[in-house]
Amino acid sequence: MVLTPPETAAARLRAASPVIDALGDAWIVGGAVRDAMLGLPAGKDLDVVDPVDGVARARELHRLLGGVLTVHDRFGTATVTVDGWSVDVATARAERYPRPGALPEVSVPAPLTEDLVRRDFTVNAIALRPDGEVLAFPGALDDLLTRRLTVLHPSSFRDDPTRLYRLARYEARLGFGVDHETEGLAREAFAAGAPATAGAARIGNEVLLLLAEEPEVAIRGLELLRSLGADGLEVDRELLRRAGALLPDGLPHGPLLLAAVCGGVPDGWHVENPGPVLDAARDPAGLAAEMRAAVKPSDLHRVLRGRTAEAAALAGAHGAEPQARSWFDDIRHVKLEIRGEDLVAAGIPPGPEIGAKLEEALRKRLDEGISGRDAELAAALAHVPR
Ligand code: ATP
């Protein structure tokens, strides 16, 4: 395999994004360069490093291109979003870790070579200028060519253990190998309990990024993490696959995977919408048993009432696959055409009787296949709640 020459990579990025021509002598770094040189399609994120003043560069981009400018004063960085592109701009910086796992101390501006040294893997330590000039950490282009993930120095994982999880994400997504020494360092870092020094929230964010990848990629990355010694991840490939296959199209797999792999939301992790994770993690084997015990469609409807798709899918994978399928395909979205008001209009006094009658109409709809407003109304009115 060959790498796309830097001039061609720059030209492709220029063709893909209006931002590139406005960058002047700033450098594109990280994933966009890596992917362009691999010949992969451009994403919509750019990381840019300005040799002198990242915020001033971002202001200039904003002046030239419009869009929205957000300055992160605390970090001396800025983001410009324009035409669907998100451009993070920073001043070239050097970083020093005061202690393992802590956030780094930053000095700016620093030579671009220092900015590359602070990065996670050599393949992400390549800078490309719009004119095609390239500056790479020693060995980076060779690693990119041979598809290999290599840390930049032996204390990399100790300094920042989130890189252990980034390693898994890149290995799985890009299908790269892991450099032999890097693999040894990752094992040592896990064995020494390095993740604990970074704090749960930061580790959690990286795991969530992995879980947000395509399901097969996420599973592969999780397996790598397990094999390197990561704690707290239960990875049963077959179970995860079965559960994922049950989940309706269009739903993200992340919450389901998190429930299955971590048994819920680990302490300190920030999950924006924890509901589906917590619901799916609530005794999936027990729910599967209840689903199997359901004799009629209305039983299954009752068992899964108020439960999320994630819960049904995970329970399905725990031995209730036909029941989960039937719920997703035939039961989940069944709704009565009549409502409580219809029964009140037919002379039933408001109160618990209404609910019982609607329940009976739904039962007949699910178990006996009645359909249409009139049939539902007749079923509800014929029912005498006990
Ligand atoms: P992706 O394709 O997943 O977006 P990316 O390389 O663009 O990959 P980002 O998380 O956007 O990933 O990070 C941009 C760049 O910043 C990385 O390529 C890497 O050089 C650097 N970086 C990010 N996180 C770290 C870290 N924890 N340690 C060192 N460098 C990092």
Image (cartoon, grey):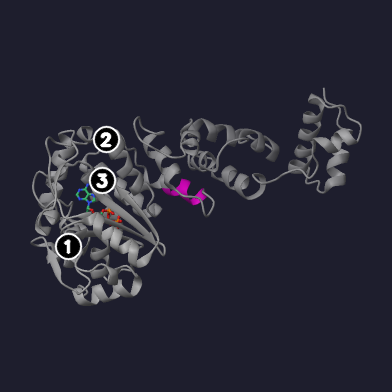
Q: Residue at x 49, y 34 (%)?
A: 284
Structural distance between the alpha carbons of marks 1 and 2: 32 Å
Q: Position of residue 6 (x, y in %)?
A: 19, 73
Structural distance between the alpha carbons of marks 3 and 1: 20 Å
The residue nearer to you, when weighing 269 against 82, is 82
Q: Position of residue 367 (x, y in %)?
A: 75, 41
Residue 162 visible: yes
N-terminal label among 1 and 2: 1
Residue 175 visible: no
Residue range corresponding to the magenta coloring: 241-246
> Which corner quadrant holds the C terminus?
top right
N-terminal label among 3 and 2: 3
**Residue at mark 3:** 165
The secondary structure that most of the magenta stretch takes on is helix
Q: Amino acid at mark 3?
A: Tyr
**Residue at mark 2:** 231
Q: Residue at x 23, y 71 (%)?
A: 130
Reply yes or no: does residue 244 show up in magenta: yes
